[in-house]
């Protein structure tokens, strides 16, 4: 079924699409899209020392207390690889509301399962303690310019700008600079309603608001209106914009295949976001997506709250990878996981940890050199300069910033020289951050 009455249902379904403008890129067919991108945002500022950059509970030289609440000898690693990770704290620290289906004691399984596809980037200097600035910098590569598009929007605008759901977002930093239309989804069930907008019961093909004859007339009226508007438009860009807007409401692509790729039982939270993104990729309707998991701004009761949030995040990423694998597109997908910034390497008076301008990133999948760690921090969780070739600590080197990461992302995606990328340039030396 074509995406009939799409715009009419946006408000009711929780799915909102902005009209694109100013697009001039080639629209690739779904079969030509060689790589998908998922940006997973840990909203609020996560604590890498409790996950992928562990320190242990050694006392700081400034007397502010230990960095972590576990012993250095409790730090774990994956086989013979350099990937080290924190032991999951005592599950009794978690609240009673922790879901029983989350692998609270299974960080081991996550890192051991995905180590071969994973590169950890530590010691990323964000130069900010601002939620807004940090989120923008981590996901766009530019700190100060609020017009900078998120990488997910930029790559979608180049790979497939006319796809109706080409860049899907559940939040985080999803500015587009007008390059592409963002699609914001509230739940997996939104797709079902959009696929069958003329059904009051999406599971019953006979529960119709309007009979098929009336719906065909509505579609024809829309098509006639589109043609009239295009004919009356005088500027080529205006004609393209009208055509792209109507693609959203009555294009040739359909949502039937997307529905067929969703699991039989739809999930909520980040699991549901993952299911939607994977199905949209597989169906050819999207090429990039933002996923979000919150609860990381742990100014109080840090250990308990980070435990809950990290467990939920890792559970969601694991579910995403399983969905990509189920649909046969895991090898074509790059997944990045990061946050606004990090947390202070000491506790405040409320047993919380405050904002700290150093963070990490987990990179998995296509274009990523696995079983590896680049970048580093010292025992007090300060970013260290690294050699520009080896990306290992070097006093004469440079600190890794989100700008370096995004330059490498553009290189990986093959979009560095594209006009849309040149419109939003990145400065500084190129670092082979992903190493594939």
Image (cartoon, grey):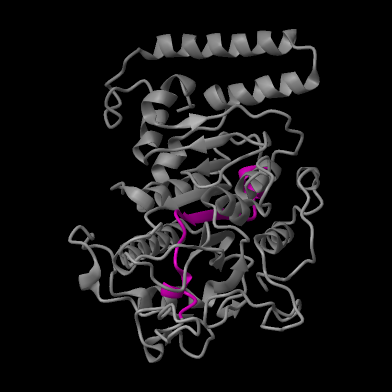
- Residue 268 left/right relative to 120: left
> In the orientation shown, which residue stands out farthest toward the left?
96
Quarter of the picture holding the C terminus: bottom right
Residue at (17%, 61%) from the top-left corner? 96
- Residue 224 left/right relative to 407: left
Residue 41 lies in magenta, yes or no?
A: yes
Name the spot of residue 383 as percent of width and height, x first: 61, 74
Residue at (64%, 77%) from the top-left corner? 384
Q: Nearer the viewer, residue 374 or 266?
A: 374
Residue 38 lies in magenta, yes or no?
A: yes
Quarter of the picture holding the N terminus: top left
- Residue 284 left/right relative to 354: right
Name the spot of residue 238 as percent of width and height, x first: 73, 19
Q: Indicate whether 120 appears above or below 222.
A: below
Name the spot of residue 397 as percent of width and height, x first: 75, 78
Q: Quadrant of residue 89?
A: bottom left
Residue at (72%, 81%) from the top-left corner? 390
Name the spot of residue 423 as percent of width and height, x first: 79, 43
Q: Quadrant of residue 30?
A: top right
Residue at (33%, 61%) from the top-left corner? 300
Q: Magenta residues, as a range?
A: 28-54
């Amino acid at each position: 079924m074509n995406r009939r009455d799409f715009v009419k249902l946006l408000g009711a379904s929780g799915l909102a699409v902005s009209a694109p403008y100013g697009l001039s890129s080639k629209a690739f067919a779904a079969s030509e899209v060689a790589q998908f991108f998922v940006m997973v945002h840990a909203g609020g500022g996560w604590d890498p020392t409790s996950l992928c950059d562990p320190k242990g509970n050694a006392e700081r030289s400034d007397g502010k207390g230990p960095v972590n609440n576990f012993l250095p000898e409790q730090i774990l690693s994956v086989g013979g690889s350099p990937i080290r990770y924190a032991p999951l704290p005592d599950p009794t620290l978690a609240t009673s509301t922790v879901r029983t289906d989350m692998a609270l004691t299974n960080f081991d399984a996550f890192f051991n399962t995905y180590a071969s596809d994973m590169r950890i980037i530590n010691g990323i200097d964000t130069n900010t303690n601002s939620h807004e600035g940090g989120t923008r910098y981590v996901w766009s590569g530019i700190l100060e310019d609020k017009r900078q598009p998120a990488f997910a929007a930029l790559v979608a605008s180049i790979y497939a700008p006319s796809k109706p759901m080409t860049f899907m977002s559940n939040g985080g930093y999803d500015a587009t600079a007008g390059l592409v239309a963002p699609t914001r989804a509230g739940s997996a069930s939104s797709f079902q309603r959009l696929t069958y907008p003329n059904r009051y019961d999406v599971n019953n093909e006979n529960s119709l608001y309007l009979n098929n004859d009336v719906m065909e007339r509505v579609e024809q009226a829309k098509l006639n209106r589109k043609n009239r508007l295009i004919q009356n438009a005088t500027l080529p860009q205006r004609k393209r914009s009208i055509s792209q807007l109507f693609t959203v409401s009555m294009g040739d692509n359909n949502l039937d295949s997307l529905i067929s790729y969703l699991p039989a039982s739809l999930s909520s939270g980040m699991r549901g976001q993952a299911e939607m993104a994977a199905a949209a990729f597989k169906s050819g309707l999207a090429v990039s997506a933002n996923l979000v998991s919150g609860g990381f701004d742990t100014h109080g009761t840090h250990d308990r709250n980070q435990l809950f949030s990290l467990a939920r995040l890792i559970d969601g990423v694991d579910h995403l990878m399983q969905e990509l694998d189920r649909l046969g597109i895991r090898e074509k997908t790059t997944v990045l996981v990061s946050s606004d910034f990090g947390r202070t390497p000491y506790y405040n008076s409320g047993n919380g940890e405050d904002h700290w301008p150093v963070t990490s990133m987990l990179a998995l999948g296509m274009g990523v050199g696995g079983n590896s760690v680049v970048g580093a921090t010292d025992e007090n969780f300060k970013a260290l300069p690294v050699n520009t070739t080896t990306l290992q600590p070097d006093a004469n080197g440079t600190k890794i910033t989100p700008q370096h990461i995004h330059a490498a992302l553009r290189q990986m995606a093959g979009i560095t020289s594209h006009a849309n990328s040149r419109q939003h340039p990145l400065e500084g030396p190129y670092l082979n951050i992903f190493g594939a």
